[in-house]
Image: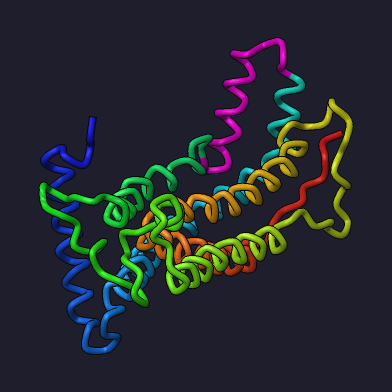
Amino acid sequence: MDLSAFPPIAALLDGAHALLMGVAALLEPLVGAGSAAAAVVLVTLLVRAALIPVGVSQAKAERTRARLAPRIADLRRRHANDPERLQRELLGLYSAEGTSPMAGCLPLLIQAPIVGAIYALFILPTIAGHPNALLEQQLAGVPLGSSLAGSIASGSLEPGALVVFAIVIGSIALVGELTRRAFRRQPVAGAASEPTDPAAPAAVLGSAGMLRAIGVLQFLTAVIAVFVPLAAALYLLVTVAWTLGQRLVLRRAYPPIAPPLPA
């Protein structure tokens, strides 16, 4: 089932498409033929800026989870044989701290439909029954609806297009590497070292694995950019660059917590 053809969603996408093309028309006197690509960048920045409160909420939730991790692990250890008592204790802990187990998930649920709708504008060939005019525009002579993989498969890849794709996809990979280095696990003075004991709290043992998974996902975005239209690749580039900058700012505003392991 094509959800984009569902009337309410189609109407939403059609309105967003008209707005995007209107922005491109406004930018055309300033940037010329690259106005559509500039509109993609500008709209993506505006959407990410509007979602800043969501990012702040998620950062606070992550900090709270890190602070409560030792106490949660201790409760799970003490009440491992009494699930009902464990559930009551966990709910009591969350209530006393003014948070909930879903605090970190709600921000993702809020931004998912917004991000999904914007991303759809950059990959759908038709919107509300008419061609997606954005994908017919060009950046440095390369159609925004073309992809690197598709151009290679059809034998239509030209040197100029290869340079454009290489810059965009290479930039995504570079941001991924910068993100991996900026957020790799760092020892914190006075904090316990990462445990190797299998009896250690799962929240602590899983942190390194989570960071490794985030690093892999950063490079997976560059792989995805090989197969999606150039417009979507531009969106991904702006998104990962914004996300890196936002995470650096939020890490300074909400420094990571390295809680001591429970006895």
Using residue 7 as the reference point, say whether residue 198 is left or right of it.
right
Q: Position of residue 50 (x, y in %)?
A: 35, 64
Residue at the spot 37% in from the left edge and 50% down from the top edge: 111
Instruction: Pick whichever, 118 or 255, lies toward us.
Output: 118
Image vertical order of residue 109 relative to residue 136, above or below: above
Q: Position of residue 214 (x, y in %)?
A: 63, 48
Q: Position of residue 35 (x, y in %)?
A: 27, 78
Residue stretch rendered in magenta on the structure: 79-99
Instruction: Pick whichever, 231 or 44, lies toward us.
Output: 231
Q: Residue furthest bottom?
A: 30
Residue at the spot 61% in from the left edge and 60% down from the top edge: 176
Using residue 12 as the reference point, say whether residue 229 is left or right of it.
right
Tell whether position 93 is magenta: yes
- Count of numbered marks: 0
Q: Residue furthest front?
A: 155
Q: Position of residue 213 (x, y in %)?
A: 65, 44
Image vertical order of residue 163 relative to residue 81, above or below: below
Q: Quadrant of the C terminus?
A: top right
Residue 79 picture quarter: top right
Using residue 32 as the reference point, say whether residue 131 is left or right of it.
left
Tell whether position 208 is magenta: no
Magenta stretch, overall SS: helix
Q: Residue furthest top?
A: 81
Residue 245 picture quarter: bottom right
Q: Quadrant of the N terminus?
A: top left
State the scheme by which the image is colored. Answer: rainbow
Residue 142 picture quarter: bottom left
Image vertical order of residue 47 relative to residue 27, above or below: above
Residue at the spot 34% in from the left edge and 75% down from the top edge: 141
